[in-house]
Image: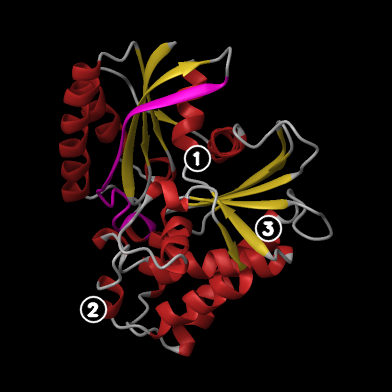
Amino acid sequence: MTRVAAVDCGTNSIRLLVADADPATGELVDLDRRMTVVRLGQGVDRTGRLAPEALERTFAACREYAEIIKTLGAEKVRFVATSASRDAENRAEFVGGVLDILGVEPEVISGDQEAGFSFTGATKELAGGAEDYLVVDIGGGSTEIVAGRESVRAARSVDIGCVRLTERHAPASPASAADVAAIRADIEAALDLAGRTVPLTGGSHTLVGLAGSVTTVAAIALGLPEYDTRAIHHSRIAYGKVREITERLIAATHDEKAAIPSMHPGRVDVIVSGALILLALMERVGAAEVVVSEHDILDGIAWSLA
């Protein structure tokens, strides 16, 4: 066993996994797994820069994570940064801050690398059969779509994410028909682009959905009284249920969304865009259901250390 610490810093949240990994058995035993909404990507789509207050929120979470990593005695640490920090002009400020706090330099990875980590994390427990997977990782700034079986065959990262689309179109609560149409137009254009690299139609893939937008939709579909990782992991949510929940979220006020027991406060204002991405993808693929995974890019990063 190797004790590893993986940090995934995205557009909306920063997450930590400290785990014992055994490559011989394929076992990854969680010691600590947590998420903090820091909205690092605040305003990046508009300004091209990381906001000072967003950086400070992120650095505060890094200081907390540094204490946990030290206490648990991780032998190897890897910090991966994704969409927001890829796009920002002042990403050197972000890199320097993380290096000072955690002692490791954040790797600002490409969309293709992000897709590979997501695929490994999502399918390692599932792989081994004759099944083809289409993995969709709906982030804050980008969405990764990856096709493969035991390894990646094709992948594409597209610049649609729950934060990016929300900031771009500023939908009201409830969202108007015009709001939804504008968001859907961006999603459909991105799926057209992704489809040039990753076959989205005509296949018999098992659709696997990752990240907070997907898991939140799943939690609502399951009627959970609170967010429950064990209940959500590997749950199967039918297309009809995803559509029903998306329409409910579109029609809800901010307070009604915030009152959903399984809704994280940091996701209330962006969940409509995230749900619309999932719904549009299921329609494009013709998926009858989505298999929801709580294991994702974070687990892929951990395995890369092991």
Q: Would you name the residue on which mark 1 appears?
A: 296
For the residue marked with disc 2, what is the amino acid? Asp
Which amino acid type corresponds to the residue marked 1 in the rendered image? Asp
Asked whether the residues under the numbered discs 2 and 1 touch, taking CB atoms below 8 Å apart as contact, a structural biologist would say no
Q: Is residue 147 left or right of residue 55?
A: right
Q: Is-magenta flag for residue 37?
A: yes
Q: Which residue is mark 2?
A: 255
Within-10-Å neighbours for mark 3: few <14, some 14–19, many 20+: some
Q: In the rendered structure, which segment of residues is drawn in magenta?
A: 26-45
Residue at (25, 34) in percent of width and height: 93
Indicate whether 70 appears above or below 268: above
Mark earlier in primary sequence (2, 1) = 2
- Secondary structure state at the residue bearing disc 2: helix
Is residue 118 rendered to the left or right of residue 106? right
Q: Look at the numbered disc 3 and give the secondary structure of its residue.
A: helix
Label 1, residues with CA under 10 Å away: few <14, some 14-19, many ≥20: many
